[in-house]
Image (cartoon, rainbow, N blue to C red):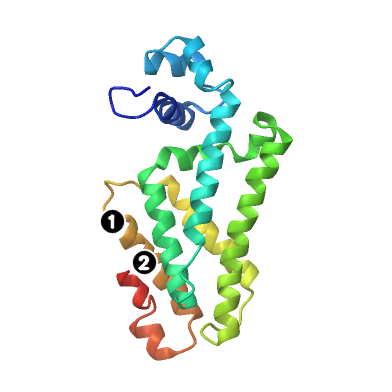
Amino acid sequence: MQSDNGLSRREELLAVATKLFATRGYHGTRMDDVADVVGLNKATVYHYYASKSLILFDIYQRAAESTLAAVHVDPSWSAREGLYQYTVRLLTQIAANPEGAAVYFQEQPYIQEWLTPEQVDEVRAKEVQVYEHLHGLIDRGIASGEFFDCDSHVVALGYLGMTMGAYRWLRPSGRRSAVEIAQEFSTAVLRGLIRDESIRTGSPLGDAAGA
């Protein structure tokens, strides 16, 4: 069944719950609140989501999967191009769904209370995969001589923190677009990583900047 806005009922419930979780917090939102906003009775809401925690888990699953997809790169790209494209994809996702990103990070300290151990393990496993892909990308750049030697573990963690932390202020209607911000982030970091001075100063984002 579809709602008036063209979304399936389940998608509409997820979108409404995400907005409520972002503004009121997971703990401060009741299933009754979701039902009231959507205009359904609570029994119908439970038909689509058997519990509030399943809505939260759905938000986490989707966010983790989209972030994992963002970090996969075209094998023909250089390390710097891969890093830039990851940044574009991730910031574009955050700008398109800032509430979902806010819920993901705001509820992080508490997910062991809200979700089952199996669900938490699934979320954590995807987060580790995201880190490993980015860490591996930086290591590839070092091994090929494209990047200066560095502590790739620290750089990967720092870059994840910088990009993902943008959920606090990045908005679709902001002064700079997600792509423009991705260019600024990537250029700043890559100019500290790229060995070749002509590339570092001339085209740090590489050909993938036009992809």
Residue matched to label 1: 176
Marks 1 and 2 sit apart, C-alpha to C-alpha, by 10 Å
Kindly tell me whether residue 72 is visible in this rendering.
Answer: yes
Residue 14 falls in which quadrant of the image?
Answer: top left
Label 2: how many Cα within 10 Å (few below 14, some 14–19, many 20+): few
* Residue 132 location (% of width, % of height): 63, 63
Residue at 57% over, 23% down: 52
Q: Quadrant location of the N terminus?
A: top left
On screen, 10 above or below 79?
Answer: above
Which sits earlier in the primary sequence, circle 1 or circle 2? 1
Q: Residue furthest front?
A: 1
* Residue 20 location (% of width, % of height): 45, 26
As drawn, is 69 to the left or to the right of 177? right
Q: Quadrant location of the C terminus?
A: bottom left
Residue 109 falls in which quadrant of the image?
Answer: top right
* Residue 175 location (% of width, % of height): 26, 53
Residue matched to label 2: 184
As drawn, is 125 to the left or to the right of 38? right
As drawn, is 28 to the left or to the right of 206? right
Q: Residue furthest right?
A: 117
Residue at 73% over, 36% down: 117
